[in-house]
Amino acid sequence: MFLFGPPNIEKMKARRDVKALIQALGYKKDYMIRDAAAKSLGELGDPRAVQPLIAALRDESLLVRCTAAQALGWIGDPRAAGALITALDDSVIDVQEYAAEALVKIGSPAVDALIAALSTSQGSVKEHVAKILGMIGDIRAAEPLIAALKAQSSSVRRAAAIALGKIGDPCAVDPLIFVLDDQHGEVARAAANALKRIGDPRGIEHVNAWDAPRIAKMAEKREAKRLRDLVDDYVRSLDSIVISDWKDSGDLIQEGDTIIPFIVRKLRSLIKTGDYTNLQHATCLFDVLGRINTPAAVEAAWEFVSTPSRNRQYDTLIRRSAIECIVYMRDLEPARDYIQEIVSKYLAMVPDNEELSAWIRDVTGYERMEQTATGQKVESGLPKEESVMLGDSEQERPLYLPNKLYSGIRFGSGGVGCGLEEGVYGPCFYKTSDGGETWQKVDIDGLVTAVYFINLDTGWACVRDYNNGNSFVVKTSDGGATWIESKSLTDYQLESIFFVDNNHGWVVGWGGKIFATTNGGMRWVAQRSGVKTPLWGVHFIDTQTGCAVGEEGVILRTTNGGQTWSFVESGTAAWLRVVFFTDCLYGWAVGKAILATKDGGITWSKCPTGWGKVNSLISAYFANRRSGWAATRYELIITEDGGLTWKATGE
């Protein structure tokens, strides 16, 4: 058969050669030939094609099955009803729809087969059959459809109610009235619409009595679902590594107190899992609560301060986030009362935990409250006319720095921070002990290229000797009054230093140099970076996991404390000056581009900033996933959306 190439369907159709078209319907080499043959047989409408087209409903090709069902509808032969009903269970929804349309076109001759299928079929087929019977509108289907109102599937009950409304048989009124009490709202609504369509006075009376409270309840449920989905969509968007994909928290904030119960419910769910990613999402929800800034939001946050988390491992993280949320709302009376309780309760509980005590004092403004109570006044160490304020919101604590080049801005616990100002003979080192309220210049002999303080007293600085050009690290244990110098590490300049605790630290610099210490800087060991490119920034999440960045878009990552470093694809060749992590997942690399990561530095994506001076960023600090600051050579800029957009302070 067809020894001289594929069959010519157009010629066969023009000759009305049904026999040849039926043979072409079995042409296995090309499904397009089979599809064209099925279509032509349907258009010719010859009943001889019914059985071959029924067989084609099982063709391996989706396209052929759809066309075969359509063709059987065009022919309209009731012999195809059984096969079309079977096709309603096809794995592909397109075939199901074509089969349903064909059965409707066959009409009343197919009703008997459909009624039989209504009582024997299951699941979606039963639902399809009910819908088809309603579209055909044959009154013979009324009694079987009434029986289907008791089906286990709510979808079938709904389809049966809709079909009875289309048929319009008055015998369906009482059964439909009974269905008004169906536990599934969509089924009850379908019954109400069917009764309205039938128009029987008894049915209309019951619908009117049912409708008002039902509509109010459904509206309440819809509103609850909308608010719940709003929270869920926001949290789900935080999974994206691309910051621009994050939902705007403003959509939640504008809902005010009405959305707070849904935020609290989501917080409980996220915290209960104990998954660290979910806990980070929880911190973002605490941020939303704080920005709602109402007494109800204060009470919601207090629940997570006063009640220990079931997950003890992360209890401190959750309480910290909740405390920060309450402090953000400190202008509200209940927040002020709770802050006093936090100070009195938690400072008494952790007297030996210097870091946590310092954090509580810092975030609640404990020292400033004490100074206010005793009449003390804190003056800025710099003339106000030569200062720049970081943060243009009244809710944020101002940070004063010299109005020149500032870089290496770092903050540890307890409000301890440090930064560099460009001086006549190189950078000058400034230090703050009160979160930036006042700054003091610290003198170190040599060219200071990087500084880092981990607490009020302990800090390190990278210094280059003016005479021989060698670089070394100095350490202070008394807030910068005296410094202990390490042995010379390299003749390359060191550009960044970072410590995760009093012992574990790293420095990076030119020539791809990396040095590490495990004893607080008494001894430094060189590590192999695998690159010769200048490295400008380093940050560690813990004693094992960290990243270093440098020129030509270089990003290095380690998971064993720097014993080995691996190259990470950055997607850019831009100079990267700073790398910073807020937690074990979320971090940024800043320089002539801004990159973000949400998986601890494994993958990075570029953030479109919409700010023209991004190519001159030389320093950055992030308080959380969204709020961050960066320095250009003569300007401080801020972001409130994780680095997506930036603006100069004071704008």
Image (cartoon, helix red, strand yellow):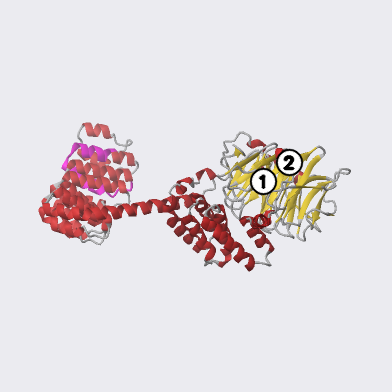
Q: Where is residue 71 in the image (x, y as percent from the top left)?
A: 23, 41
User: Any magenta on residue 60?
Assistant: yes
Secondary structure at badge 1 equals loop
What residue occupies the far front of the structure in this picture? Answer: 375
Magenta range: 36-61
Q: Where is residue 328 in the image (x, y as percent from the top left)?
A: 56, 52
- Report crowding for label 2: few under 14, some 14 to 19, many 20 or more residues within 10 A (C-alpha): few
Instruction: Give the quarter of the figure containing the C terminus.
Output: top right
Secondary structure at badge 2 equals loop
Look at the image and tell me whether residue 289 can be seen. Answer: yes
- Report crowding for label 1: few under 14, some 14 to 19, many 20 or more residues within 10 A (C-alpha): some
**Foreground mark, 2 or 1?**
2
Mark carried by residue 399: 1
> Horizontal placement of 438 versus 474: left or right?
left
Indicate the amino acid at tag 1: Leu
> Horizontal placement of 47 versus 635: left or right?
left
User: Which residue is located at x 48 percent, y 50 percent?
Assistant: 292
Q: Position of residue 151 (x, y in %)?
A: 22, 61
Instruction: Give the quarter of the figure containing the N terminus.
Output: top left
User: Which residue is located at x 77 percent, y 61 percent?
Assistant: 519
Q: How far apart are marks 2 and 1 (CA)?
A: 13 Å
Comparing 317 with 496, the one in front is 317
Mark carried by residue 383: 2
Q: Position of residue 442 (x, y in %)?
A: 79, 48
Indicate the amino acid at tag 2: Pro
> Horizontal placement of 558 versus 13: left or right?
right
Mark carried by residue 207: none
Indicate which disc, 2 or 1, sits on the residue closer to the N terminus.
2
